[in-house]
Image (spheres, rainbow, N blue to C red):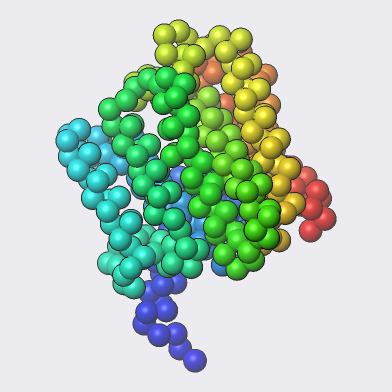
């Protein structure tokens, strides 16, 4: 039986979101592909919206000729559109249309969306961070994304109420770890291109090996805490989350082995063969 026009549009919108993610991150796109069923679609729909907001406050918005005032207005408008999206069944913007379906299905907390946009708004004006500012930024830019992902994972397979706090802590820690890894590997671009210094200990001095070691230890603590609860995730999410965690763990190890002065000038990467090996290891660890 042919699909209805609305169902066909739903599918096209979901493909648009998947394409956004595939265009920006091969690693994330691969990890998302390892998710199963509806979870894969929901994660892609969520991350497409996140990616667009991130691009707006980073170089793409300014390169498009938007002034700081226009960037702020555009971000405000996009936040309002994202918050309102679940209440509307049809959107002319396919990414918002796909996101709205996911937000309804996963019952996203609007407070998490507001926290995310609050952190994005900081990127328009703030260039350095105190420890308290850093914690707040990490919460909004990364920890709430982990919580929203957890909503996607558990939408059709709810966790026992007694285990939800542990799963939420793991989701927050994993999101934080991913963000800190990205801050460290993107240190050169953030500093020279965007004029931002996220790590508080680097506000008034360049990265050295002692500071790098402290950051690495913090990341590894987050990854360890997050990894402990992955076995409790539904099967539809477990492999994708394991693969993403393994990839960021490998990045962390590479950053740990890279001198601080090299991190300050180049972006550390994991080769395609190594990514493939990590995937095989993830598969074996889960006995898939």
Closest to the observer, 133 or 48: 133
Residue at position x 33%, y 31% from top?
123
Closest to the observer, 238 or 276: 238
Q: Please state the horizontal and vertical placement of residue 205, each as a whole percent of the image.
A: 45, 7
Name above or below for residue 253 compared with residue 271: above
Q: Please state the horizontal and vertical placement of residue 57, each as a whole percent of the image.
A: 31, 37
Left or right: 226, with 68 as reference point: right
Q: Please state the horizontal and vertical placement of residue 219, each as a whole percent of the image.
A: 62, 28
Residue at position x 40%, y 50% from top?
111
Residue at position x 67%, y 29% from top?
220
Residue that protrudes farthest toward the bottom in the picture: 1
Q: Quadrant of the C terminus?
A: bottom right
Closest to the observer, 41 or 265: 41
Name above or below for residue 280 compared with residue 201: below
Left or right: 126, with 162 as reference point: left
Q: Please state the horizontal and vertical placement of residue 262, each as a whole percent of the image.
A: 55, 15
- Number of numbered discs on residues: 0
Residue 255's image quarter?
A: top right
Left or right: 276, with 82 as reference point: right
Residue at position x 57%, y 64% from top?
155
Closest to the observer, 155 or 235: 155
- Answer whether residue 104 is visible to the viewer in this image: yes
- Answer whether residue 19 is visible to the viewer in this image: no
Residue 180's image quarter?
A: top right
């Amino acid at each position: 039986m042919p699909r209805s026009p609305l169902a066909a549009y739903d599918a096209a919108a979901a493909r648009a979101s998947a394409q956004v993610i595939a265009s920006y991150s091969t690693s994330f796109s691969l990890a998302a592909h390892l998710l199963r069923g509806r979870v894969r679609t929901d994660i892609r729909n969520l991350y497409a919206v996140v990616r667009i907001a991130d691009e707006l406050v980073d170089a793409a918005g300014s390169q498009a000729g938007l002034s700081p005032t226009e960037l702020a207005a555009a971000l405000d408008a996009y936040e309002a559109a994202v918050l309102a999206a679940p209440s509307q069944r049809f959107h002319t913007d396919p990414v918002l249309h796909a996101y709205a379906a996911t937000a309804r299905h996963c019952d996203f907390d609007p407070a998490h969306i507001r926290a995310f946009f609050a952190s994005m708004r900081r990127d328009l004006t703030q260039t350095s961070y105190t420890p308290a500012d850093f914690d707040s930024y990490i919460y909004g830019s990364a920890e709430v994304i982990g919580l929203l992902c957890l909503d996607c994972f558990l939408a059709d397979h709810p966790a026992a109420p007694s285990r939800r706090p542990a799963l939420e802590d793991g989701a927050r820690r994993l999101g934080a770890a991913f963000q800190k890894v990205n801050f460290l590997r993107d240190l050169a671009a953030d500093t020279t291109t965007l004029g931002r210094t996220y790590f508080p200990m680097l506000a008034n001095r360049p990265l050295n090996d002692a500071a790098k070691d402290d950051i690495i230890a913090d990341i590894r603590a987050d990854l360890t805490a997050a990894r402990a609860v992955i076995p409790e995730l539904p099967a539809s999410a477990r492999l994708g989350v394991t693969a993403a965690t393994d990839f960021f763990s490998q990045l962390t190890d590479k950053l740990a082995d890279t001198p601080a002065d090299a991190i300050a000038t180049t972006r550390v990467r994991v080769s395609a063969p190594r990514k493939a090996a990590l995937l095989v290891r993830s598969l074996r660890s889960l006995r898939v």
